[in-house]
Amino acid sequence: MEITSLEKFLQERIKVGGKAGALGDSVTVIRDKNKITVTANYAFSKRYLKCLAKKYLKKNVVRDWLRVIASNKD
């Protein structure tokens, strides 16, 4: 499982204005070695991001062994 493929998956699947993949300047997805940071300039649900991460894990058949958690409430 490559971290670059997760970054690409998120860039393609995150919806902005009802359109998937049209991030523009409102959402940025940045990768630093083994960490991905998603920054949004508008109201963005962590639950939605968690759902996308779970879809990616399910697609790669590792959902049963890995868990998606948030680092903090903010």
Image (cartoon, rainbow, N blue to C red):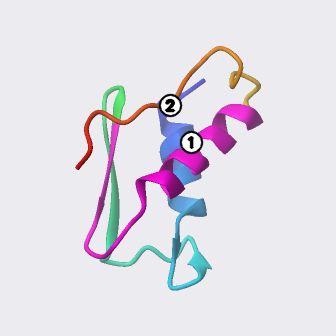
* As drawn, 26 above or below 57: below
Q: Quick one: which residue is furthest to the top in this view?
A: 65
Q: What residue type is labelled 2?
A: Val
Is 50 magenta? The answer is: yes
Looking at the rendering, which quadrant does residue 56 occupy? top right
Would you name the residue on which mark 1 appears? 53
Q: Quick one: which residue is furthest to the front in this view?
A: 73
Q: What residue type is labelled 1?
A: Ala
Q: Which mark is residue 25?
A: none
Foreground of the two, 48 or 30:
48
Q: Please give left or right for residue 47 compared with residue 54 in the image.
A: left
Residue 6 placed where, x, y %? 54, 40
* Crowd rating for badge 1 (residues with CA inside 10 Å; few <14, some 14–19, many 20+): some
Q: Please give left or right for residue 34 compared with residue 64 in the image.
A: left
Q: What element carries label 1?
A: helix
* As drawn, 27 above or below 7: below
Task: Work out how far the residue at label 1 is from the one at label 2, CA to CA, in angstroms.
Answer: 7 Å
* As drawn, 23 above or below 47: below
In the rendered structure, are the residues bearing label 1 and label 2 in contact, judged by CB atoms less than 8 Å apart?
yes
Instruction: Say which residue appears at 55% left-offset and 24% top-offset.
Output: 67
Image depth: mark 1 or mark 2 in front: 2
Instruction: Say which residue appears at 58% left-offset and 19% top-offset.
Output: 66
Q: Please report the bounds of the magenta region as a residue range.
A: 36-59
Instruction: Say which residue appears at 30% left-offset and 76% top-offset.
Output: 42
Would you name the residue on which mark 2 appears? 68
Is 65 magenta? The answer is: no
Pointer 1 or 2: first along the chain: 1
Looking at the rendering, which quadrant does residue 15 occupy? bottom right
